[in-house]
Amino acid sequence: MKIFTTRISLQDYLSQRHSAGKTFGLVPTMGALHNGHVSLLATAKTYTDEVICSIFVNPTQFNDPKDLEKYPRPIESDIKKLNEAGCDVLFNPTVDEMYGPDEHWHLDIGPLENILEGKYRPGHYQGVTQVVYKFFDIIKPDFAFFGQKDYQQVMVISRMVALLNLPVKMVMCPIIREPGGLAMSSRNVHLSAQDHENAQDLSEILTLVKQQFSQHSTGELKQIAIDALKANPSIQLDYFEIVDADTLFEPNPDTQKLVALVAAKVGSTRLIDNIILD
Ligand SMILES: Nc1ncnc2c1ncn2[C@@H]1O[C@H](COP(=O)(O)OP(=O)(O)OP(=O)(O)O)[C@@H](O)[C@H]1O
Ligand SMILES: CC(C)(CO)[C@@H](O)C(=O)[O-]
Ligand code: BAL
């Protein structure tokens, strides 16, 4: 695998490969790679000639400085995992390589910005669109791969692609879970053994909601889920919502499918998860 830390060296390499007619898939990550990331890489390999993974802990998307500070950064083991996954290129820039002084960014992504994750992490999606736009601009991938675990993020980035007519195709990949059901996440390393057990309630309740989907109204299901989550004192719920999977707003008569989304702190670790109800 080739490793680049500067834009110029990466672009030099990519322009040669573009001239050779190769197609590129981008898997953007913040590192601390797990099998969720590996599954994105595996899917990307089936779409394009070469797969590029970016590892960059993007400061502009963190609303909590402590979360940024303690974000895991095990770069040596990440490189090993990328090699094992057959990744072709790693782009691992520094913050100074990605951002100049006094940069400002604002993209009007509409109502998606301030609901759900946007409400609990103010400014988060401005930081996400800012850095993903930069990656798309530097790399010009044919396809970009994102996990369903960050469902709202996929919608926000798809909105940016549509608004700015960016020539990249978005691919959303399924959530990879631990055997007990917990969605894999880089932040899971912060969970104590006890937190880890408590965190399983999130996926268990999402699964229960899916199983009971045909027997209850969405209002009833939401209440069942909230009551079950609140019964566990180690879970501090931010939100549990059942919304239109295409808009993330209240379902209406045109709604085709629903998604149940949850965000909660378990111990001091904030986790998100979701399930599509169809
Ligand atoms: N369990 C998973 N299954 C599939 N895709 C995942 C999973 N976890 C993360 N991803 C995807 O990997 C990409 C990079 O995510 P990121 O590096 O933030 O990892 P993460 O595990 O989501 O970390 P965290 O949420 O703790 O920041 C995103 O598109 C994300 O949706
Ligand atoms: C897409 C992303 C790599 C942008 O920093 C990040 O939000 C993530 O890991 O999901
Ligand atoms: N996977 C989403 C990145 C974040 O939590 O900031």
Image (spheres, rainbow, N blue to C red):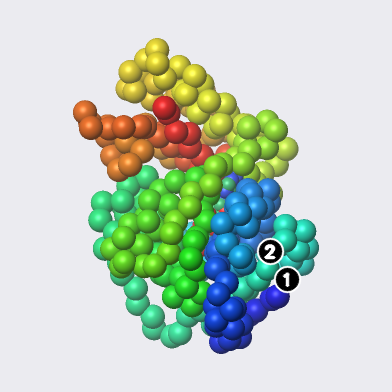
Who's the residue at 38% across and 25% down the image?
222
Looking at this view, name the residue that lies furthest to the front: 21
Front residue of 201 and 152: 152
Whether residues under marks 2 and 1 lie with C-beta atoms below 8 angstroms apart, the answer is yes
Residue 117 vs 54, above or below: the answer is above
Front residue of 201 and 259: 259
Residue 33 vs 165, above or below: the answer is above
Q: Which residue is mark 2?
A: 87
Is residue 14 something that shows in the picture? no
- The picture places residue 111, in percent across and down from the top left corner, at 26, 51
Disc 2 residue: CB within 8 Å of ligand 1? no
Who's the residue at 48% across and 37% down the image?
274
Q: Seen in the image, is 174 located left or right of residue 75?
A: left
Looking at this view, name the residue that lies furthest to the top: 215
Instruction: Give the CA separation, mark 2 to mark 1.
Output: 6 Å
Q: Which residue is mark 1?
A: 1
Instruction: Give the residue type at disc 1.
Output: Met
Give the SS element for disc 1: loop
